[in-house]
């Protein structure tokens, strides 16, 4: 299995757990993270070594990227798996799909790469190299059908995880938070490149909201000391407790990614934020083919939440938008109505379990 980032590690770990239920003799070797390692098997390389964000950043890391590809290819040949299971992480995983297919190894893909957003020509690679695709967004099945490729929509694992979540009783006490002050959740991402771009701007507006406590969702795959230069009076940090944080939040500032969907499923009004290098953004504008960047708006097919992107992502706009989010009851109601539509479209299908059942079924039939 190959997962190249934190969210992929999370979803791959749940899939591994369900695969073990379906096949008690299953053995795993993987490139992934701590959550996958906790499920058993052998972690070969941690995803934090692979994390690259943006077009320019990827280009400047090309030699390291090629080295990892070669190492992974050698690792696959040595292990001789019954199936290679790829989780998102398109730039790396589509190359590995081609290699595995050329070696006669079956290839399954869980969580489709976002080729519907840009470089739709990659569909031909998916058709050529991926035996079975397991999609987690409802519109992806129709997207692939346009190219004559049938995929399995197995439900959304984020929706399942939120539905199953039970809040921690002592969350406020354990994190030294004030139970009587409403929380604004700040979700800056899980990679250093994202956090550097996003977090300073997000917390700069704190003086305008003194009656609220700003709580940042940190991640332990980064050194906790890394967050120290973001500390300000009134800022609090919690680590690996994003769901707990969202279950108590009044509003949220969220870096575009899976976290936007998590925030919506917790019913928290949010502002979606994103900024990258100017060159990466310029290239992205030329190749990205979708009208929104957040999963919330993409799944809904319309603007449910405000997106502040690149130049629009600044303290002035954040301040104005957050004030509207907190004080305009009609605005809050419209967002929450959009969230209800979102939940209906996603459904509750136990995505990891359904995917594991189909994977084992397909393997045994081959």
Image (cartoon, helix red, strand yellow):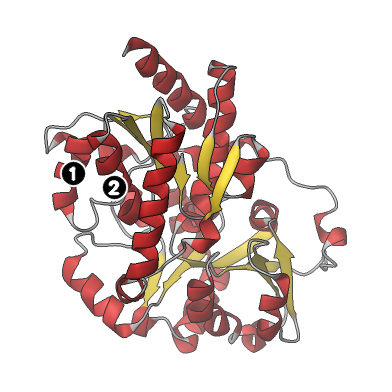
x, y (%) of residue 247? 67, 52
Q: Position of residue 189 (x, y in %)?
A: 53, 66
Q: Which mark is residue 247?
A: none
Write down the residue under mark 1.
Answer: 125
- Can residue 250 be spotted in the picture? yes
Distance from disc 2 to disc 1, alpha carbons, whole Å, reads: 7 Å
Label 2 residue SS = helix
Which of the pair 16/185 is nearer the observer? 16
- Circle 2/circle 1 CB separation < 8 Å: yes
- The quarter holding residue 176 reads bottom right
Q: Residue at x 29, y 47 (%)?
A: 94
> Residue, x 33% and y 11% (percent of image)?
365
Name the residue that disc number 2 marks.
Answer: 94
Local packing at callout 2 (Cα closer than 10 Å; few below 14, some 14-19, many 20+) is many
Residue at x-position 57% and y-position 35%: 14
The image quadrant of residue 188 is: bottom right
Measuring from the top left, give residue 260's x and y in whole percent. Answer: 48, 58
Picture coordinates of residue 224, whole percent (x, y): 72, 71
* The quadrant where residue 150 appears: top left
């Amino acid at each position: 299995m190959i997962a190249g980032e934190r969210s992929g590690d999370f979803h791959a770990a749940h899939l591994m757990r369900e695969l073990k239920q379906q096949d008690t003799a299953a053995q795993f070797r993987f490139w992934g993270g701590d959550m996958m390692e906790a499920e058993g098997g052998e972690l070969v390389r941690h995803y934090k070594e692979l994390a690259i964000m943006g077009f320019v950043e990827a280009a400047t890391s090309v030699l390291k990227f090629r080295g990892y590809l070669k190492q992974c290819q050698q690792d696959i040949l040595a292990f001789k798996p019954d199936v290679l299971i790829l989780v998102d992480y398109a730039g790396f995983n589509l190359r590995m799909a081609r290699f595995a297919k050329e070696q006669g190894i079956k290839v399954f893909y869980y969580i489709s790469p976002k080729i519907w957003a840009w470089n739709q020509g990659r569909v031909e690679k998916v058709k050529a190299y991926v035996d079975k695709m397991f999609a987690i967004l409802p519109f992806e099945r129709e997207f692939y059908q346009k190219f004559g490729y049938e995929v399995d929509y197995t439900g959304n694992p984020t929706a399942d995880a939120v539905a199953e979540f039970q809040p921690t009783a002592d969350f406020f006490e354990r994190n030294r938070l004030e139970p009587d002050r409403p929380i604004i959740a700040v979700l800056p991402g899980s990679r250093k490149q994202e956090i550097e771009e996003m977090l300073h701007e997000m917390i700069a507006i704190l003086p305008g909201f003194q009656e609220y406590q700003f709580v940042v969702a940190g991640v332990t795959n980064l050194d906790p000391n890394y967050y120290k230069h973001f500390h300000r009076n009134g800022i609090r940090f919690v680590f690996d407790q994003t769901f707990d944080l969202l279950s108590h939040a009044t509003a949220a500032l969220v870096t575009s990614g899976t976290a936007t969907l998590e925030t919506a499923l917790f019913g928290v009004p949010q502002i979606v934020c994103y900024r990258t290098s100017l060159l990466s953004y310029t290239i992205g504008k030329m190749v990205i083919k979708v009208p929104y960047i957040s999963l919330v708006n993409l799944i809904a097919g319309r603007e449910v939440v405000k997106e502040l992107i690149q130049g629009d992502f600044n303290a002035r706009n954040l301040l104005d938008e957050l004030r509207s989010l907190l004080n305009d009851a009609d605005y809050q109601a419209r967002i929450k109505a959009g969230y209800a539509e979102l939940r209906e479209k996603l459904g509750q299908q136990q995505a990891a379990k359904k995917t594991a059942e189909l994977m084992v079924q397909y393997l045994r039939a081959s």
